[in-house]
Amino acid sequence: MTEIYGIVPAVNDFTQLRRFLDSEYPLCVVMNRHISNLETIAKILQEGKKHALVHCDLIHGLAPDEYGAEYLCARFRPAGVISIRPAVISACKRLGVTAIQRAFLIDSSALAKSLAAIEKAKPDYVELLPALCTPLFPMLKEKIGLPLIAGGLIQSKDMALEILQSGVQAVTISMDKLKE
């Protein structure tokens, strides 16, 4: 299992990928790319000795289901896969790839549905969105019993560092927000 900690930049294009390669961060989230770009991205990351979590639900041309996850894991062997779908999480776990389940904290109903999905899929990590829900994180950490990642609506590196103090193990933030 890949250990996920600290700040994890999200890259959406090749400009952000180049900035990530020049950064101090060892791990990124790849999202909003076409499946045909993944081979090039994987090669660039390997050459740069960097790793990626692939957001399966946000890869264009890839079905965010068990078969899509199997293809993604077998073909590109990412450090981990992010998805909201329990079938994707289960497939990744079966294949020995770190599985991160996204949970949206929109309201009590969404939280209850997310907790049920997490209980069913048993991911390695849970990514909570939006990260602005930090007052809930200590309670959720205790209730879920898994390492937590916070993401969504983070506006700066300073904000990410502050959120890391709320009990989460990592924070995902757009590479564009990490202007250094």
Image: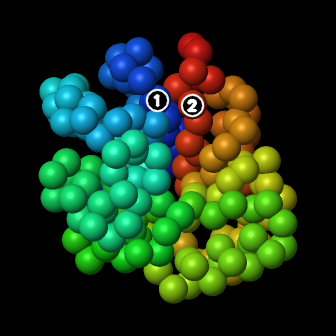
Q: Is residue 14 above or below residue 77?
A: above
Q: Which label sits on residue 41? A: none
Residue 73 spot, x, y in % from top left: 23, 58
Residue 68 spot, x, y in % from top left: 30, 60
Under circle 2, the secondary element is: strand
The residue drawn where x is 43% and y is 49% is 55
The residue drawn where x is 16% and y is 58% is 74
Q: Mark 2 and mark 1 in contact (Cβ < 8 Å)?
A: yes
The residue drawn where x is 25% and y is 54% is 72
Q: Alpha-carbon neighbours of circle 2 within 10 Å: few (<14), some, or many (≥20)?
A: many
Residue 151 spot, x, y in % from top left: 63, 47
Q: Is residue 55 left or right of residue 43?
A: right
In 3D space, how far apart are the residues under numbered discs 1 and 2 (Cα atoms)? 8 Å
**Visible residue check, residue 142:** no
- Dividing the picture into quadrants, the one containing residue 110 is bottom right
Q: Which label sits on residue 174? A: 2
Q: Amino acid at mark 1?
A: Asn
Q: How is the image coloured?
A: rainbow
Residue 156 spot, x, y in % from top left: 69, 26
Viewer-proximal residue, 35 or 146? 35
The residue drawn where x is 21% and y is 59% is 71
Q: Is residue 18 above or below residue 169?
A: above
Q: Amino acid at mark 2?
A: Ser
Residue on which the image places disc 1: 12
**Visible residue check, residue 113:** yes
Viewer-proximal residue, 155 or 162? 155
The quadrant of the image that shows the C terminus is top right
Q: Earlier in the sequence, mark 1 or mark 2?
A: 1
Q: Given this view, does label 1 or label 2 mark the residue nearer the observer?
A: 1
- Dividing the picture into quadrants, the one containing residue 50 is top left
Under circle 1, the secondary element is: loop
